[in-house]
Image (cartoon, grey):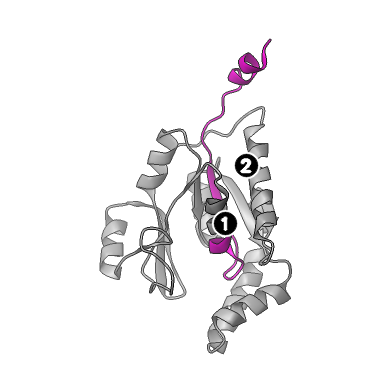
Amino acid sequence: MSYKKLTSAFPTSPLLIVISGPSGVGKDATLARMKESGLAFNCIVTTTTRQKRAGEKDGVDYHFLSEEQFHKMVKTRQFLEWAKVYDNYYGVPKKEIKEALKRGEDAIVKVDVQGAATIKKIMPDAVFIFLMPPSIEELTKRLKQRHSKLSAELKLRLDKAQEEIKKISLFDYVAVSHKDKLDLTVSQINAIITAERCRVKPRVVSL
């Protein structure tokens, strides 16, 4: 049997890849590097009500909406999952995921651990990857850089991060997020996706 015939006997379906991890672990930076690497996937842009940070672009980093606009989307069931996180709302739009899967393309979503747990109940055949910091000390350093003037918020995020790390058993894989070695983190994720492509019994996701 030729290689072409052999591979056609084991067709693969498009994957939904869920990347999660505690605040400050580097989810945004990792996805940005994945985009730069030219890997073939669709990064689903999260919708949020939080304020745009310096350098962020609407429709690229996030879909930035008012709370009124966000709640209209909630009422019309346009989110796969949504939640209020640190006083702001975040939601994963269904439409973009459906369109990517329909085209036969992998889709990647970025959510917090609570959101990942919700998606797992809805789409258990998705691939769940937990981004782990090299150490709590490194995560503390990253959060201090982001929230240096908000000690109460820093403590809240650190406490929550440690609780989220305890929920790692909800996930299929773990990848270590190295701030200065993003290519290594991306290679780990790419290896996970490659492994999923080699499953004898491929995952089949539908929405």
Report the number of numbered marks: 2
Q: Is residue 41 visible?
A: yes
Q: Is residue 207 visible?
A: no
In this view, the residue in front, 135 or 206, is 135
**Mark carried by residue 50:** none
Query: Which mark, residue 193?
Result: 2
In this rendering, position of residue 101 left or right of residue 169 = left
Q: In the image, 115: left or right of 187?
A: left
> Residue, x 54% and y 56% (percent of image)?
31
Element marked by disc 2? helix
In reply to whether residue 150 is colored magenta, the answer given is no
How many C-alpha atoms fall within 10 Å of the one at disc 1: few (<14), some, or many (≥20)?
Answer: some
Q: Is residue 146 above or below residue 132?
A: below
Q: Amino acid at mark 1?
A: Arg
Q: Quadrant of the C terminus?
A: top left
| Above or below, 109 relative to 138 | above
Residue 135 location, x and y as percent?
73, 70
- Is residue 11 toward the left or the right of residue 94 in the image? right
User: Residue drawn 57% across and 76% down?
Assistant: 157
> Which of the image's four quarters has the N terminus?
top right
Identity of the amino acid at label 2? Ile
Is residue 9 one of those drawn in magenta? Answer: yes
**For the residue carrying disc 2, how many other residues have a C-alpha within 10 Å: few (<14), some (14-19), or many (20+)?**
some
Q: Nearer the viewer, residue 69 or 2?
A: 2
Residue drawn at point x = 58 percent, y = 50 percent: 37
In the figure, 136 relative to 70: above or below?
Answer: below
Magenta-drawn segment: 1-29
| Res 154 → quadrant | bottom right
The disc, 1 or 2, on the residue closer to the chain's N-terminal end is 1
Q: Which residue is mark 1?
A: 33
Q: Residue at x 65, y 16 (%)?
A: 6
Q: CA distance from mark 1 to mark 2?
A: 16 Å
